[in-house]
């Protein structure tokens, strides 16, 4: 029987995102999803709610379609834990709807990086705003917001 390998990670609480995440969010904030591609490995995988998206093209297409359905939104970072190859953070996803309503929902993300390339290999959206937003928008016929994800 082969011995199990154990990996111990040290994550430190931080007041801000690691530099590679700041660089990445410049493209996210500008909604330049194609500009994100150099940050991701060829075998990138995104776990978004109950979806598994393989490859950056599939992930960008999915997130881009979701993005187009929201009039205005913001990710507000609350707590960030970072290490050399893993970043975990949570915050609030705030959306301004067309009728002026503001909806907020928590989100939790985990990002894994290949230490040999510095590229993101896996992202987990552990609490996905998409499902929370959909349930809040369908609270009645007259107050509903249809989204397709």
Image (spheres, grey):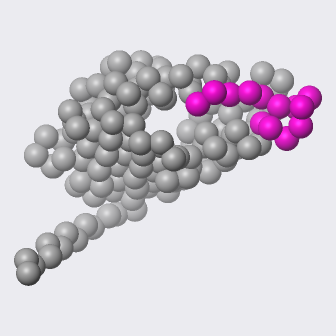
Residue 82: where, in percent of width, then height? Answer: 33, 56
31 left or right of 35 in image: right
- In the picture, the quarter occupied by the C terminus is top right
Residue 147 on the magenta span: yes
- Picture mark count: 0
Residue at far left of view = 2
- In the picture, the quarter occupied by the N terminus is bottom left
Residue at x-position 67% and y-position 46%: 132
Please state which of residues 33 and 134 is positioned toward the viewer in this rendering. 134
Residue at far right of view = 142
Query: Magenta residues, as a range?
Result: 137-149
Residue 92: where, in percent of width, then height? Answer: 61, 47
Residue 27 visible in the picture:
no
Residue 32 on the magenta span: no
Please state which of residues 138 and 20 is positioned toward the viewer in this rendering. 138
Dominant SS of magenta comes to loop
Please state which of residues 111 and 23 is positioned toward the viewer in this rendering. 111
Residue 60: where, in percent of width, then height? Answer: 41, 26
89 up-or-down from 13: above or below: above
Residue at x-position 52% and y-position 46%: 49
Please state which of residues 93 and 77 is positioned toward the viewer in this rendering. 93
Residue at x-position 48% and y-position 29%: 63
Residue at far front of view = 1
Residue 9: where, in percent of width, then height? Answer: 25, 67
Residue at x-position 41% and y-position 42%: 52
81 left or right of 39 in image: right
10 left or right of 51 in image: left
Residue 4 visible in the picture:
yes
């Amino acid at each position: 029987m082969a011995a199990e390998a154990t990996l111990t990670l040290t994550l430190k609480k931080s007041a801000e995102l690691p530099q590679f995440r700041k660089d990445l969010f410049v493209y996210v904030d500008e909604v330049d999803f194609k500009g994100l591609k150099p940050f991701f490995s060829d075998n990138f995988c995104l776990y978004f709610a109950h979806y598994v998206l393989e490859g950056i093209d599939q992930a960008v297409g999915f997130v881009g379609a979701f993005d187009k359905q929201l009039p205005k939104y913001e990710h507000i970072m609350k707590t960030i834990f970072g290490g050399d190859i893993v970043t975990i953070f949570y915050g609030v996803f705030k959306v301004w709807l067309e009728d002026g309503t503001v909806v907020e929902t928590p989100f939790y993300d985990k990002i894994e990086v290949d230490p040999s390339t510095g590229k993101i290999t896996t992202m987990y959206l552990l609490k996905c705003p998409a499902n929370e937003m959909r349930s809040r928008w369908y609270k009645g016929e007259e107050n509903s917001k249809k989204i397709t994800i």
